């Protein structure tokens, strides 16, 4: 067993994402806090991802289902069918292969914990 204190997990910059259509802000800036460093689990990957105001991931898919748990701020999650606002305490389940994006609303930062299967 291992107890991880998020306040003690280092922040790692993430490369700039491809902005979603309609993005009017500047460079898309995010950081990651690896909760489970690579190789720490045979089954899961998990990080906190921190988005600056209006920053998003850009469209992408995963090879496994993804779970997002919003821990700070207000955001948006979208797939090809539409988009929804997300807030602290919301849990989002994204299916394997589902084209989607997520990130902060234009007037808010947003952080979420992400959980996927180890690939």
Image (cartoon, grey):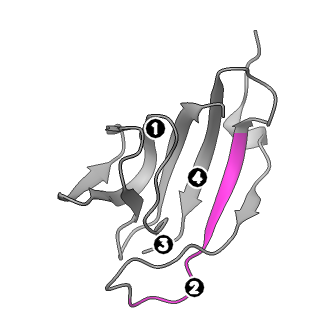
> Residue farthest to the left?
81
Mark nearer the N terminus (2 vs 4): 2
Quadrant into which the C terminus falls: top right
For residue 88, the mark is: none
Element assignment for label 2: loop
Q: Position of residue 112 (x, y in %)?
A: 49, 47
Query: In the picture provided, is 11 more to the left or to the right than 99?
Result: right
- For marks 3 and 4, the one nearer the N-term is 4
Marks 2,3: beta carbons within 8 A? no
> Pointer 3: what residue?
55
Which image quadrant for residue 70?
top left
Measured as percent of width and height from the top left, residue 117 is found at: 58, 30
Label 4 secondary element: strand
**Gap between marks 2 and 4 measured at Cα:** 16 Å
Hey, which quadrant is residue 28 in on the image?
A: bottom right
Q: Residue at x 50, y 52 (%)?
A: 111
The residue tagged 2 is 27
Distance CA(mark 3)–CA(mark 1): 19 Å
Q: In the rendering, at what x and y percent does residue 3 appear?
A: 73, 19
Q: Which residue is mark 1?
A: 66
How many neighbours does mark 2 have within 10 angstroms: few (below 14), some (14-19), or many (20 or more)?
A: few
Q: Is residue 31 magenta?
A: yes
Mark 4 — residue? 49
**Label 2 close to label 1 by CB (< 8 Å):** no
What's drawn in magenta, residue-wise? Answer: 24-34
Is residue 28 located in the magenta-colored stretch of the structure?
A: yes
Compared with 3, 30 (above or below) is: below
Please state which of the two labelled residues, at mark 4 or mark 1, is closer to the viewer: 1
Do tag 4 and tag 1 residues touch (Cβ < 8 Å)? Answer: no
CA–CA distance between discs 2 and 1?
25 Å
């Amino acid at each position: 067993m291992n107890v991880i204190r998020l306040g003690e997990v280092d922040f790692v910059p993430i490369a700039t994402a491809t902005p979603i259509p309609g993005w009017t802000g500047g460079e898309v800036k995010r950081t990651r806090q690896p909760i489970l460093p690579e190789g720490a689990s045979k089954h899961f990957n998990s990080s906190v991802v921190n988005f600056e105001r209006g920053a998003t991931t850009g469209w992408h898919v995963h090879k496994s289902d993804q779970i997002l748990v919003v821990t700070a701020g207000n955001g948006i999650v979208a797939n090809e069918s539409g988009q929804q606002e997300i807030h602290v305490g919301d849990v989002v389940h994204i299916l394997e292969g589902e084209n989607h994006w997520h990130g902060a609303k234009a007037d808010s930062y947003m952080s979420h914990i992400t959980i996927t299967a180890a690939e």
